[in-house]
């Protein structure tokens, strides 16, 4: 395996779910084609959350298995020739494995939760039905620590107080347990966002005391054994941002692992991670089916490279290029590749770069492009490059043939992850890399409205056509769906269903 690190550049499904005020029973995810006319479900899947309407997290209470937005999605994809669009209901309760919560109120009555819609008033949500149960348990433990130690929650108007936010992330990667038990026994990585510039600022004694309280009462030697690790982030900005740039590992395991897409994934508290771990794993398994074996893949907006690395492991890809603008993701990428199977022979590269700048530099030489942009959708320059990929392909290839065409900041670095310690050394890019343009585009979207606009634009000049589309219930209780859309180059192929039907009719006459 060659590893290089770059810097700078249709019938309605029946659902087995039940409405109850008790902890909801497990339900089974099903991905089935959707009909054009919504039909009533045999049972109502209700949220039954005491915080509904006051909390801004969930927007609807009933029929969690079928967001209203699905009707629009079904009609949209049918308009563009996809009649077998499917929707996976995923887990309806206790699905959120990553939560960022504001801490306000007072030490005697701390409020830990989300802002009320349109305000900066924090709503306490101790019994959130969306949270993994162990997040709620860790929040309760934190609440006790704040009260007992007299930790001052942040006061926005005055800029005073100690604890601004907390991030709770659950890992279910515990190989000592049977697979069926790992989810409910997940451990929580706690990040305390402290209102100071650094660890030795005034108030650091309270920070250490709170971390020790969590570890003593929730760590591996406690009866609860709930906490995976405790981190601190230091933030004093008056802007509406959660994290500062300074991080410190306080207690517990430094490395946070999860198993998704067939690989072990390392996620630092500073890096992006999907909130719905199970749903993301289902999506990755579906995505893998659309990537031919031994393909060359470019993964744009790659984060820590989870999608690209899962394809390297499961599809034996010839090469993987991961492009990500957030440099914090580099550490997670490095750790993840250390656990990739030794049988992988892919050439894997990670680039710290903006995918919207010089997009053809990243697209050239790839058979498949995977894009997973933020909610706002694709940058205009990338859409333009994808729409004009045929006409500009020759220009890109000729520029790559010229000497010194690789910019200085995009020269590669070799990352030898199989050695006892990672070593980085300068090296020139490999020659004779196949130069082509992608034939498959896989778009993963968390913003439905922005996806529709991007999709219309990509299909407008008929360079691409839409072959498949699937949706996933990443955020039950909201009007958000995660979409996996597969585009192919060239004119859309005609469906062969009618021809087969005529052939059968002729055969029946004889």
Image: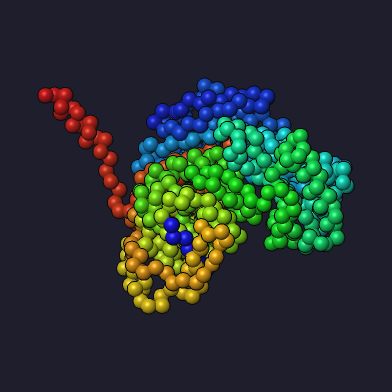
Q: Residue furthest top?
A: 42
Question: What residue is shown at x 61% (from left), y 28% (from top)?
Answer: 46
Q: Where 313 falls versus 399 (above or below)?
A: above
Residue 322 in view here: yes
Q: Where 39 falls versus 357 (above or below)?
A: above
Query: Does 288 sit left or right of 140 as displayed?
Result: left
Question: What residue is shown at x 79% (from left), y 40% (from top)?
Answer: 217
Query: Does 472 sit left or right of 273 as displayed?
Result: left
Question: What residue is shown at x 41% (from left), y 38% (from top)?
Answer: 85
Query: Does 44 sit left or right of 101 as displayed?
Result: left
Residue 131 in the image: x percent, y percent?
A: 66, 38
Query: Does 203 sit left or right of 265 as displayed?
Result: right
- 318 or 487: nearer the eye? 318
Question: What residue is shown at x 60% (from left), y 34% (from top)?
Answer: 177
Residue 450 in view here: no
Residue 226 in the image: x percent, y percent?
A: 71, 39
Specify the quadrant of the image occupied by residue 500: top left
Q: Where 27 falls versus 346 (above or below)?
A: above
Q: Quadrant of the N terminus?
A: bottom left
Residue 414 in the image: x percent, y percent?
A: 49, 66
Q: Residue furthest bottom?
A: 403
Query: How has the structure been colored for display?
Result: rainbow
Q: Residue furthest left?
A: 510
Q: Give the total of numbered labels.
A: 0
- 382 or 418: nearer the eye? 418
Q: Quadrant of the C terminus?
A: top left
- 247 or 47: nearer the eye? 247
Residue 309 in the image: x percent, y percent?
A: 48, 52
């Amino acid at each position: 395996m060659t590893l290089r690190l770059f810097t700078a550049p249709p019938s309605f499904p029946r659902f087995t779910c039940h409405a109850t005020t008790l902890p909801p029973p497990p339900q089974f995810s099903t991905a089935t084609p959707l009909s054009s006319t919504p039909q009533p479900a045999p049972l109502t899947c209700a949220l039954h959350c005491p915080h509904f309407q006051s909390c801004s997290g969930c927007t609807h209470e009933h029929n969690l298995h079928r967001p209203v937005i699905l009707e629009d999605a079904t009609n949209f994809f049918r308009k563009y020739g996809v009649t077998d669009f499917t929707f996976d209901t995923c887990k309806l309760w206790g699905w959120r494995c990553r939560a960022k919560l504001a801490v306000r109120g007072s030490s005697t009555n701390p409020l830990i939760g989300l802002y009320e819609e349109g305000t900066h008033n924090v709503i306490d949500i101790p019994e959130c039905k969306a949270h993994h149960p162990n997040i709620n348990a860790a929040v309760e433990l934190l609440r006790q620590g704040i009260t007992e130690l007299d930790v001052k929650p942040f006061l926005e108007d005055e800029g005073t107080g100690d604890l601004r936010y907390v991030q709770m992330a659950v890992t279910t990667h515990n190989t000592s347990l049977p697979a069926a038990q790992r989810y409910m026994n997940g451990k929580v990585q706690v990040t305390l966002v402290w209102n100071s510039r650094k660890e030795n600022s005034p108030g650091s004694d309270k920070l250490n005391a709170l971390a020790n309280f969590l570890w003593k009462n929730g760590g591996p030697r406690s009866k609860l054994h709930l906490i995976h690790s405790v981190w601190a982030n230091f933030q004093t900005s008056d802007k509406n941002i959660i994290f500062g740039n300074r991080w410190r590992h306080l207690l517990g395991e430094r490395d946070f692992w999860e198993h998704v897409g067939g690989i072990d994934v390392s996620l630092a508290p500073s890096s992006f991670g999907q909130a719905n771990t199970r749903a993301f794993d289902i999506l990755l398994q579906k995505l893998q089916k659309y990537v031919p074996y031994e393909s060359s893949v470019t993964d744009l907006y790659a984060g820590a490279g989870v999608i690209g690395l899962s394809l390297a492991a499961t599809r034996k890809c010839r090469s993987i290029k991961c492009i990500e603008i957030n440099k914090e993701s580099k550490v997670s990428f490095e750790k993840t590749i250390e656990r990739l199977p030794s049988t992988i022979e892919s050439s894997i590269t990670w680039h710290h770069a903006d995918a919207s700048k010089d997009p053809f530099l990243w697209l050239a030489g790839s058979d498949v492009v995977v894009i997973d942009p933020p909610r706002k959708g694709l940058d205009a320059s990338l859409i333009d490059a994808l729409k004009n990929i045929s006409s500009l392909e020759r220009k890109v290839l000729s520029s790559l043939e010229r000497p010194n065409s690789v910019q200085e900041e995009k020269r590669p670095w070799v990352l030898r992850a199989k050695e006892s310690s990672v070593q980085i050394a300068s090296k020139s890019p490999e020659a004779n890399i196949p130069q082509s343009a992608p034939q498959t585009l896989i778009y993963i979207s968390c913003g439905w409205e922005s996806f529709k606009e991007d999709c219309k634009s990509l299909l407008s000049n008929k360079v691409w056509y839409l072959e498949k589309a699937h949706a996933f219930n990443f955020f039950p209780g909201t009007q958000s769906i995660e979409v996996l859309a597969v585009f192919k180059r060239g004119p859309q192929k005609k469906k062969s269903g009618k021809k087969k039907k005529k052939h059968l009719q002729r055969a029946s006459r004889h």
